Amino acid sequence: MALRRITLRDFVIVRSLDIDLSAGFTVLTGETGAGKSILIDALQLALGSRADPGSIREGAQRLDVSAEFDAAPALHAWLDEGGFETSAGELLLRRTVDLQGRSRGWINGSPATAAQLRELGERLLDIHGQHAWQSLTRPDSVRGLLDAYAGVKDGALDATWQAWRQAGAALEAARNAQDSLQRERERLQWQIGEVAKLAPGADEWEELSTSHSRISNAQALIDAAEGARHAIEDDEQGALSALNRAVALLQGCEHIEPEFKALGEVLASSVAQAADAAHSLHGYLRHADTDPQRLAELDERMSLWMSLARRYRRPPEELPALYAGWQDELKALDAASDLDALERAEHAAQQAYMKEARALGKSRQAAAPKLAKAITEAMQGLGMQGGRFEVALSALAQPSRFGLEDIGFLVAGHAGSTPRAVGKVASGGELSRIALAIAVTTSRLGEAQTLIFDEVDSGVGGAVAETVGRLMQQLGRDRQVLAVTHLPQVAACADHHLLVSKRQAQDQAAAGGAAHIESRVSALEDDARDQEIARMLGGERVSATTLAHAREMLGKPAAPAKARA
């Protein structure tokens, strides 16, 4: 997942810039104000950091930054889940910001949120800034470093903590609301008792309405059925008599007109259907009854339904659902007011949390001395011989969301001194070196294949600076390393060297072709790199001595060289 290319358009003092990057260790150097850290800022923006319209180059309408990475198969599942295309071997992140502060992002050409860019960015690279030591004073950062080194995650602990908190809150609420819960239970019980007398069935109202309508109109239905039967079966005028005569007439002539045979068959079918209808009507009339007693029963039952429906301001057909809902509410209230059950649930949630917290604590206890030893070893090569780093774990007075222990980083800057909290170390140089030791020690953690060090070597020099360079060079064998530095000793250890410079350019689009400052990046090789290392050693005026020293640092044979003014 190495970073292949960074592209900037109208970002701060950059009009247009395309930077191709390689594997190994790459340094970015340049004069103060040339824009070395601008590249890091642009990269962070592409990876989801806060959008700021103040970063748009003066005179432009919007900025546009993108970063292209090698796409590892390990990311395919994440990309598929987010609905992003998994291009073979490529991963392109892009971000734009306009003057109104509106930001848009893309992953492989598909729209993406800033949160998605940040989540993906965490998998792609780690950035260690020049003020990285400040994070060593923040409890969350300290805890995160130790947990990452221990290879543990606190997701399960957080879930059990939340469950314990919720169970405790439910228990406390129930204790504080027993009186109101009891009043609510009594109200529901009375309402349920009222409706229980009716015991409304789920589809009963519709059945009652249908039966009532049928019985209340029974005489009209009987009259209709009798009239229809008579119309079919009347000896002279009935439909059956007429149809039978028609069939006989057609059958009598079908030997003359063959078409009559088919028509006669149709009419014969109608005779059969009319006879069936008459039979059904006879059956209906045998059982039809006005049944005034049943009608009275239905009137009484429907009156109860209507009375309850008016009382609770619901349509009658909604009474069964209302009744069932009250029963569910009563069950929930019974559960909420069952203090014994709530206490058992709270205790079980506490035990689940404590089990996870103790397991996490054991992992931290095991990892703490190992992390301390690794950082202590790194400190020895950074000019802090005899210095000692410790990871202190102390029991908290109360369990917390993050476990049962407080975690602190202690450091002794030299042999014989007592380890103190990192935040109380007076020397800024020591803080920077400790942060660098931690960065080097923990940089192998996680899945990010690109590591960026933004002037983390501030406050060091001499042999220590050379050690810093060697450490980064060593890291570059396994991962891609980019470092913004002002130290020639670090720059001389790099596999690749990029120079960031600024120049005055004419804006042809502006009225009168106004001059402005632009930043650019160029790859240095051979003599050009010699000159830049010499400048870093001796300032703007490069002498034969500084040039010779630069060549020596780069491992080149001594050669006569002309100084550059």
Image: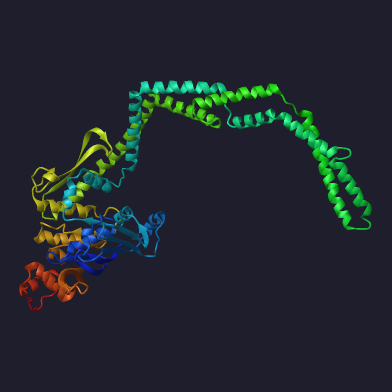
User: Residue shown at 9%/70% (left/top)?
Assistant: 535
User: Residue shown at 57%/23% (left/top)?
Assistant: 304
Residue sitting nearer the eye, 285 or 51: 285
- Among all residues in the image, which is located at the extreme front? 237
Q: Is residue 379 above or below residue 512?
A: above
User: Residue shown at 32%/40% (left/top)?
Assistant: 158
Residue sitting nearer the eye, 154 or 322: 322
Q: How is the image coloured?
A: rainbow
| Residue 139 seen from this side | yes
User: Residue shown at 12%/73% (left/top)?
Assistant: 531
x, y percent for residue 38: 20, 62
x, y percent for residue 104: 32, 59
226 sits to left or right of 431: right
x, y percent for residue 46: 28, 60
Q: Hey, which quadrant is residue 496 in on the image?
A: bottom left
Q: Is residue 535 above or below residue 357?
A: below
92 sits to left or right of 296: left
Q: Is residue 357 above or below residue 97?
A: above
x, y percent for residue 347: 35, 28
| Residue 474 seen from this side | no
